[in-house]
Amino acid sequence: MRPSGRAVRRAVVGCAVATRVALLAWAIPRFPPAEDGVFYHTVASRIAAGLGYTWQWPDGVVTYAAHYPVGYPALLGLAYAAVGSHPAVAMVVNAVLGVIAAAAAYQVALPTSGVRGAGLAGLIVALHPSLLAYTPALMTEAIAGDLLVSAAALALWAAAARRRRWAWWAVGVLGGLACLIRPQLVLLVPALGLLSVEAVAWRTRLGRALLVGGVALACCVPWTLRNCHRMERCVFVSANGGWNLLIGTASEAEGGWRSIDQLGVPPECRTEFREAHKDRCFGAAGLRRIRASPGAWLGLIPAKLRQTFDLPGAPGAYLAASNGAAFGERGKLALGGLELLAQRLLYLGVLWASARVPGPRQRWRRWLAGAGALTFLGPWAWVGLLLAALNVAWLGARVVRSPALLFGAIAVVETALVHAGFFGAARYALVLTPLLAAMAVARHEAVGAPALTGPASVCDTGEKEFEDAARRV
């Protein structure tokens, strides 16, 4: 007897709730904010108190700030204003969004993976050790991943409800919130408009992509205008792009993060104390280094991708920094090993899914998947993940029939390009994890979806017929 979709979805949500409640019961009394989380908690508390995105320095001087993106502290600020400025509130917000992400991964996978496959995708998100252990961290990466997979689920619903044009505006708003939390997602959010399990003309998909991207950008405009006024220089969302670019040119950073103080502040930037202008100065210094030695900068790309995709450990590092007595080296080692195993198995699932989906060049895709699987045995997992994205590209026009593969592959490539240019870190891959879970279970096109007949083809299947087909998968 096949399990019903409702029962499986409830099981996924119940599992996600139970694991996060248990984790929070352990973490809340033990782990105060640490690392960047100290900044997010402090700014969120100031926002809740009506002081805005400002920073009070040790000498009592208060300045406007924009170094980190505003989205996450603003979200926490709303929760703090309602309940109280305590880190436990932030952890609960993280947990709630994690539960929503598990349900969203189920919905994204359902049309092309069936109830059981979608249930597996939801359980991966519910139980993934990296996502679970990062729940107490007042950091942005897991939250950005939760919003992305939720936006993808909303986009698929919007595509099915074709006469509800407002739904695509809602997708853009959710994408805009993701951009305010993680600005580089502005490159990825328009791809949400491409998602549909129905046969829709490419011009329709591109029109939706422009709409979603435009709405997302419009959501960021008020904050950008605030920065133009308060920071004495226009900044899109956050004023740390120049810092990150400069760090990404340093060979001694080995593709990862090092503080500017460790690397050496450029002489021309030492007397610049205005936040946005200092970031611009650092960015100009980084560009000069790239122009002076482009080969050295390009040579750092493999190390940056390895730092991003191959080396899990961000949750353990955060917990140890927060309270080394409660979570020491032994805990970091155990959690890191569990994360590594889960990561490699998930990557393997993504690679295999990219090869088994029916479509063009399947024999070549399987050979490529076999070669890519070997990379997961060493520090080259990023190669295998990019090979999976290449396999998805080889599907050609048929890739639109598997929205999880389409959006997931675009997200992998976008992440690789961004961090090849700046620098890598293990926590950045957490943004992709819910999408990778939906990718890993993909197996075929939607049952009942009409075939693509050309660039001008449209789907005449009504909303009820689509929902019936999805339930039969």
Image (cartoon, helix red, strand yellow):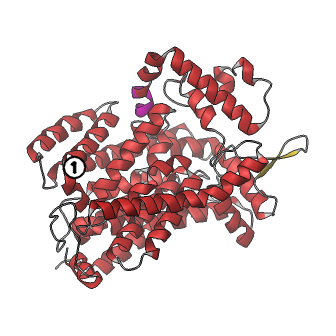
Apparent side of residue 100 relative to residue 370 in the rendered image (left or right): right
Q: In the image, 315: left or right of 3?
A: right
Asked whether 406 falls inside the magenta stretch, the response is no
**Amino acid type, label 1:** Ser
Q: Residue furthest top?
A: 292
Along the viewing direction, whichever of 12 and 44 lies nearer the viewer: 44
Measuring from the top left, give residue 377's x and y in whole percent: 27, 33
120 or 260: nearer the viewer: 260
- Tag 1 secondary structure: helix
Horizontal placement of 343 versus 39: left or right?
left
Q: Is residue 131 above or below residue 369?
A: below
User: In the rendered view, would you say 427 is above or below 134?
Assistant: above
Q: Residue at x 37, y 77 (%)?
A: 10
In the picture as drawn, the residue positioned furthest to the bottom comes out as 464
- Residue named by callout 1: 354
Label 1: how many residues lie within 10 Å, few (<14), some (14-19) or many (20+)? many
**Residue at point 30%, 39% (across, down):** 386
Percent of width and height locating residue 282: 66, 28
Where the N terminus falls, by quadrant?
bottom left
Q: Main secondary structure of the magenta part?
A: helix
Residue 212 in sight in this render: yes
Q: Residue at image x 66%, y 46%? A: 68
Residue nearest the viewer, comparing 378 with 173: 173
Q: Residue at x 49, y 64 (%)?
A: 172
Q: Position of residue 321 (x, y in %)?
A: 63, 41
Q: Quadrant of the C terminus?
A: bottom left
Residue 220 lies in quadrant: bottom right
Magenta-colored span = 302-307
Task: For residue 195, say whether it is visible.
Answer: no
